[in-house]
Image (cartoon, rainbow, N blue to C red):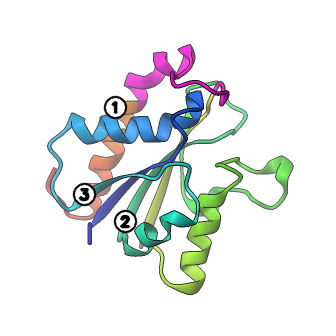
Amino acid sequence: MAELTVLGIGNILMQDEGIGVRLMEAAMVAHDWPEEIEFIDGGAGGLNLLNFIEQAQRMVVIDAADMGLAPGEHRLISPEQVRDDTPEHRVSMHDVPFMETLKLCEQFSRRPDRVRLFVVQPKSIDFGQDLTIELTAAFDRLLQETIDLIRSEAGEASLTV
């Protein structure tokens, strides 16, 4: 079982929707991480992630989310900060299946001790394999912040990075 799981979520065939997977992949190859850190391509999320979530001790989730911000802006939040009370006020993370999956783990099994969500505002989630100009321009900055977050969480878990 990994001490820190880095989960990239998104559909890479839908432009900026794939930013979570793209950042996870880039962060994975950007550094020689210890074996206690596991990197997972979570695809479009959903119930297929139950096993990964249940087994994780600590988790960093990277995803696109419609937060009403400028494209490429991001937020670092906890699951408790994701509003899901009404559809018009919801942070849309694939209509929140990751959050529902996390809640199911909590109800029926277990969830990680700590979950951090690194969410990026997309410009477009239309069909296309390339990120938009806005997210392409922000990619290096987002990647560095992703790496910094992974290092920070690894340090909190007493891992040497």
The answer to whether residue 62 shows anywhere in this view is yes
What number of labels is visible? 3
Mark 3 = which residue? 37
Q: In which quarter of the image is the N terminus?
A: bottom left
Q: Which amino acid does label 2 sit on?
A: Arg
Mark pair 2, 3: CA separation: 10 Å
Q: Specify few, some or many for label 3: CA neighbours under 10 Å numbering under 14, 14-19, or 20 or more.
A: many
Please name the residue that numbered disc 2 is placed on: 58
What amino acid type is highlighted by mark number 3? Ile
Q: What residue type is labelled 1?
A: Gln
Residue 41: x percent and y percent?
Answer: 40, 49
Mark 2, secondary structure of its residue: strand
Residue 50 within the magenta-colored segment of the rendering: no
Which residues are drawn in magenta? 123-142
Residue at 81% x, 49% y is 89
Marks 2,3: beta carbons within 8 A: no
**Image side of residue 34 versus residue 111, left or right:** left
